[in-house]
Amino acid sequence: MPLQNRVTPFGDIVAIPQRGLFTGNRGIIHDPATRALTSRRWASKAWLVCSCDYKNVRRDVMATRSWTELFFLDEATAFAAGHRPCFACRRTDALHFQAAWAAGNRTAAPKVSVIDGVLHAERLDKSGKRLHPLTSDPIALPNGAMLAANSAAYLMASRRIFLWTADGYKPAELPRHIDGILTPPSTMRAMAAGYAPVLHPSATARSADGLN
């Protein structure tokens, strides 16, 4: 039985077999005795995207009172949910993200706490996921941006659109009505300024093949 620790682009934490390319956390939000989530969905404003392979450390998932291991299909999924790269296990990527975030948001190099504060306001609408208005042609959005339409998530990659599924991405048509943008605006500006999130192979292979 899979644990409830897989994250969707909407930020929901679900129990599905697929693990994905990245792990991460939002603090301690589980009970190690039952390996089940508590009623909380975050315990820190630092929502991280971490490497699944770090210094050969192997963890017994959700078995101790340490950070709650969450899993994401890819980095674009984690970004849509409101996470950012970890400075401990992904320092090079985190520094690149920090620099791109500063450039895209036209600010001096921010402290990590500043980024976390901005993201926290951008990712949540009370207890739910905040959607941001689409103000431009969706095809012009940066690679890795995600949209919401009809209760589904769509990825923009190489000027093509893909439907997000737990198993990977599927080529899709642009929905007629778009509910909003899932990826926080400050993260999208970082992507537009040069940070390229890691995408699941199901999107990158199809983009390279020129499929739509």
Image (tube, rainbow, N blue to C red):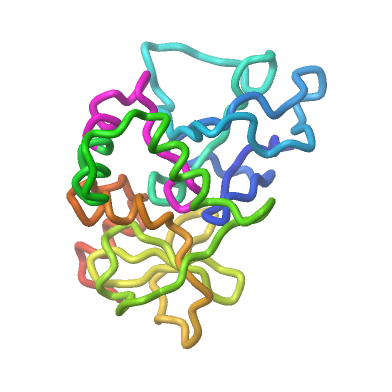
Is 173 rendered above or below residue 67?
A: below
| Residue closest to the eye, 204 or 36 | 36
| Residue 76, x across and y down, in percent | 39, 51
In screen coordinates, is 68 left or right of 168? right
In screen coordinates, is 206 left or right of 67? left
| Residue 162, x across and y down, in percent | 39, 68
Is 156 rendered above or below residue 51?
A: below
Quarter in which the C terminus is drawn = bottom left
Count of marks overlaid on the render: 0
The stretch drawn in magenta includes residue 89? yes
In screen coordinates, is 46 left or right of 158? right
| Residue closest to the eye, 85 or 160 | 85
| Residue 93, x across and y down, in percent | 26, 32
Residue sitting at x 21%, y 37%? 108
Instruction: Residue lying at the far bottom in this picture: please name it.
Output: 176
Residue sitting at x 57%, y 34%? 70
Part of the protein shown in magenta: 79-96
> Quarter of the image holding residue 205?
bottom left
The stretch drawn in magenta includes residue 199? no
Quarter in which the N terminus is drawn = top right
Residue sitting at x 64%, y 35%? 42
In screen coordinates, is 8 left or right of 28? left
| Residue 26, x across and y down, in percent | 57, 32
Is 153 rendered above or below residue 200?
A: below
